[in-house]
Image (cartoon, rainbow, N blue to C red):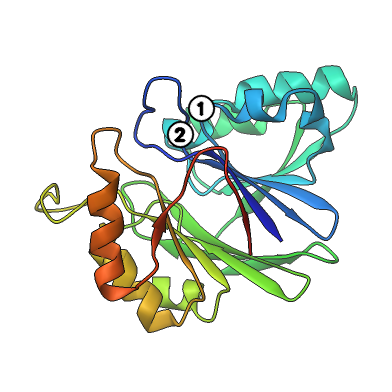
Amino acid sequence: MKLHIIGKYGPYPKRGKGTSSYLVEAEGKRILLDCGAGAASFLGEEAAGLDCVVLSHLHPDHICDLLLLDQAIRMQAPGRRVDLYLPQVAGSVHGLLRSLEGFSPIPVEGECSFDRKELVLRFWPLTHPVPSYGVSLEAGGRRLAYTGDTTLDSRIVKLLAGADAALMDAAFTRETLPPNPAHLWAEQCGRYAREAGVGRLLLSHIHPLADEAVVEAEAAEAFPGAQVVREGACYTI
């Protein structure tokens, strides 16, 4: 299993960088986790080769390239519809995404799982201002857990439990932590990863103004070896 980091920033990108979007390659499949700024450019002429797209939630920094991706799929492979997993919610954004002709929408609701032959997707609802899901991907005997955006939630440990790698929302440090955070912070990511017994902790959804060395150091207090991901990097899980 390989994890490609397309974009790691949120809620907006650094200049020339991207927001939350990750490509997973496993057992011959290509899965896009979230579709933030930079996803369509990264996939380019290979957009129609995606096996599926998973949206953790519908905030702009996680979906903003989806319309471009839809256009690429329709032009590269007319008639092809890529499976699109997205939260079952009401509203105009959800309606727009369901109408895209390059995708076949699959609603995600509550704790659920989907068996895609050599790939299993498992979803857990987590805590964010809008319906948001963590997801684990299991393929070839390896497991990657992705929190999407969330704040404190006991279900995070279930999501992460025993994962070979955890990709986590590390939006804040102790200094920048607001009174009622909608996201996790680096130190808490480390605590959850340690409690769940994950093999490796990868930190993402980094604020563009954050000191990434501080993010990494605070997570490493609870989970030595924690890393802030690098855009353009590929991690073997």
Mark 2 neighbour density, 10 Å: few (under 14) some (14–19) many (20 or more): many
Residue 82: percent from left, percent from top = 79, 39
Residue 124's place in the image compared with 234, above or below, is below
Q: Quadrant of residue 104?
A: top right
Q: How far from the left and from the top, in percent, is residue 191? A: 30, 74
What residue appears at the point 73 percent right and 24 percent down from the top-left corner?
44
| Distance from Cα at disc 2 to Cα at disc 1 | 5 Å
Badge 2 marks a residue whose secondary structure is: loop
The answer to whether residue 170 is left or right of residue 148 is: left
Nearest the eye: 120 or 168: 168
Where is residue 120, by image quadrant? bottom right
Q: Nearer the viewer, residue 112 or 30?
A: 30
Q: What amino acid is at disc 2?
A: Thr
Quadrant (top left/top right/bottom left/bottom right) for the N terminus: bottom right
Numbered label attached to residue 16? none
What residue type is disc 1 on?
Ala
Q: Looking at the figure, which quarter contains the C terminus?
A: bottom right
Residue visible at 76% across and 26% down? 101
The answer to the question of whether label 2 and label 1 lie on touching residues, with beta carbons closer than 8 A, is yes
Q: Secondary structure at mark 1?
A: loop
* Residue 227 as seen in the image, left or right of residue 218: right
- Say whether disc 2 or disc 1 marks the residue closer to the N-terminus: 2
- Please state the horizontal and vertical placement of residue 17, each as a whole percent of the image: 45, 27
Residue located at (57% from left, 31% from top):
95
Label 2 belongs to which residue?
Answer: 19
Relative horizontal placement of residue 146, taking residue 216 as reference (left or right): right
Residue 207 seen from this side: yes
Residue 233 in picture, x, y percent from top left: 57, 44
Q: Residue at x 26, y 60 (%)?
A: 217
Mark 1, residue position: 37
Q: Is residue 184 visible?
A: no
Count of labels in the image: 2
